[in-house]
Amino acid sequence: MLPLVDSGWIDVCRVTPWITPNGSRGFLPGRAIARDELPAVLVDDANRAYPDDGEWIGHLTLTLTEAGRKTSW
């Protein structure tokens, strides 16, 4: 994953809560985690596990950067 971050194709973010325009509860990617923080974040098993309760808030997600969207098919 780090080579994709280093190449500028993806960001690793934490899922944050969001209220949709119709008032429903949703979620969005938060700010990108700094590259120098990623090794410690990724080594923690809790950050790589899918949540059993389906609650993604605070868990990691990957997002394409502008460069990543240009390479996507």
Image (spheres, rainbow, N blue to C red):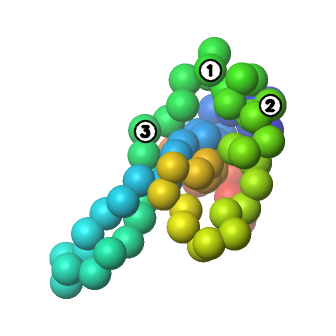
Give 50 or 66, whichever is nearer the viewer.
Answer: 50
The structure residue drawn at horizontal position 55% and vertical position 62%, both measured from the top left corner, is: 56
Q: Tell me which amino acid carries mark 3.
A: Arg
Disc ID at residue 31 = 3
Dots 1, 3 in contact, CB < 8 A: no
- Secondary element type, mark 2: helix
**In this rendering, position of residue 20 left or right of residue 52:** left
Whether residue 18 is situated above or below residue 16 in the rendered picture: below
Dots 2, 3 in contact, CB < 8 A: no
Disc ID at residue 37 = 1
Residue 70 in view in this figure: no
Looking at the rendered image, the disc whose residue lies closer to the viewer, 1 or 2, is 2
Mark 3 neighbour density, 10 Å: few (under 14) some (14–19) many (20 or more):
few
Q: Tell me which amino acid carries mark 2.
A: Val
Percent coordinates x, y for residue 12 in the rendering: 61, 41
Q: Work out whether mark 2 precedes mark 3 in sequence or the reverse, and give the earlier one.
A: 3
Whether residue 10 is situated above or below residue 42 in the rendered picture: below
The structure residue drawn at horizontal position 41% and vertical position 64%, both measured from the top left corner, is: 27
Q: Which residue is mark 2?
A: 43
Q: Work out whether mark 1 precedes mark 3 in sequence or the reverse, and give the earlier one.
A: 3
The structure residue drawn at horizontal position 72% and vertical position 23%, both measured from the top left corner, is: 40
Marks 2 and 3, Cα distance to the nearest angstrom? 19 Å
Q: Work out whether mark 1 precedes mark 2 in sequence or the reverse, and give the earlier one.
A: 1
**In this rendering, position of residue 57 left or right of residue 49:** left
The structure residue drawn at horizontal position 20% and vertical position 80%, both measured from the top left corner, is: 23
Percent coordinates x, y for residue 46 in the rendering: 72, 45
Marks 1 and 3, Cα distance to the nearest angstrom? 13 Å
Mark 1 neighbour density, 10 Å: few (under 14) some (14–19) many (20 or more):
few
- Secondary element type, mark 1: helix
- Secondary element type, mark 3: strand
The residue at the far top in this view is 36
